[in-house]
Image (tube, grey):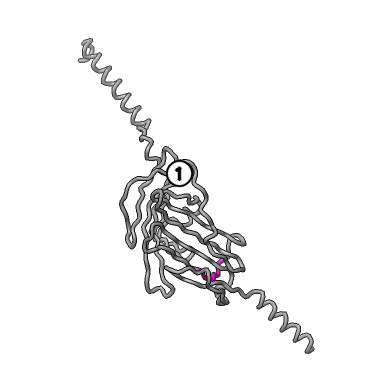
Amino acid sequence: MKGVLVAGITAVLVVAAVESLSCVQCNSWERSCVNSTASECPSHASTSCVSSSASSSPETAIRLYQKMFCSAENCSEETHVTAFTVHVSATEHFRFVSRCCQGKDCSNTSDALDPPRKNVSSNTECLACYESNGTSCSGNRWKCYEEEQCVFLVAEFKNVTDTESNSLVVNGCSNVSNATCQFLSGENKTFGGVIFRKFECANVNSLTPTSTPTTSHNMGFKASLSLLAFASLLLLGLWP
């Protein structure tokens, strides 16, 4: 009987050890979380580890924001990475990377490199600007590369105690996927520890002239024919 009891307790301890999860838990606006060590996750958030980073160039209030934490959510894959860049000019951009690791600690997000940009497109351009701690920005238009679309976002970054926050407004050309656009669209969506107050995507083809609707053209053509027929009747004296 004692042997059965000891075996049962051992099995419970083994299961508990397997289910425990340790993640790096770090929140920083200035310093890197690379040298931070992992610690055991609380029981209510012991499913996966999340590692996120946001950076801007040139440096704004969000030079480098990192947040690494334990999560209760399941990743769609064993390791799932969401990354995109919004280009404001040839030297200005905003970069966001978030990695979710199912049942294991995440490595630093800095190794998720921005894919090389393709040739400049000749028919897509977007408003390009950024502003710290605002809700909008104004600037010039920027010609996009292939497979980029226009993005407008307002992101908020909070410190570890949620007592302070910084925000960043960005307009520009982005390689963000349509799936990410749909997921973040709307307002006040928290993802990877970042609060996206607004996130709007649009495939804008501003260099193509707007075509006149066919219905309007047909109506104008029919009206011209009617007027011509009426004038002909007057000239022939057939109209009373």
Question: Mark 1: which amino acid?
Answer: Tyr
In this rendering, position of residue 125 left or right of residue 2: left
Q: Residue at x 23, y 12 (%)?
A: 238
For the N terminus, the quadrant is bottom right
Q: Residue 91: where, in percent of width, then height?
A: 40, 51
The magenta segment is: 68-73
Which residue ends up furthest to the bottom in the rendered image? 2
Q: Residue 63: where, in percent of width, then height?
A: 41, 63
Q: Residue at x 30, y 20 (%)?
A: 225
Q: Is residue 85 magenta?
A: no
Q: Residue 83: where, in percent of width, then height?
A: 50, 56
For the C terminus, the quadrant is top left
Give the quarter of the image for residue 38. Answer: bottom right
Above or below residue 72? Residue 92 is: above
Residue at image mark 1: 145
Q: Residue 118: where, in percent of width, then height?
A: 49, 43
Q: Is residue 69 magenta?
A: yes
Q: How many numbered marks does the figure carry? A: 1
Q: Residue at x 78, y 89 (%)?
A: 2
Q: Residue at x 29, y 21 (%)?
A: 226
Dominant secondary structure of the residues highlighted in magenta in the image: strand
In this rendering, position of residue 163 left or right of residue 115: left
Front position in the image: 181 or 156: 156
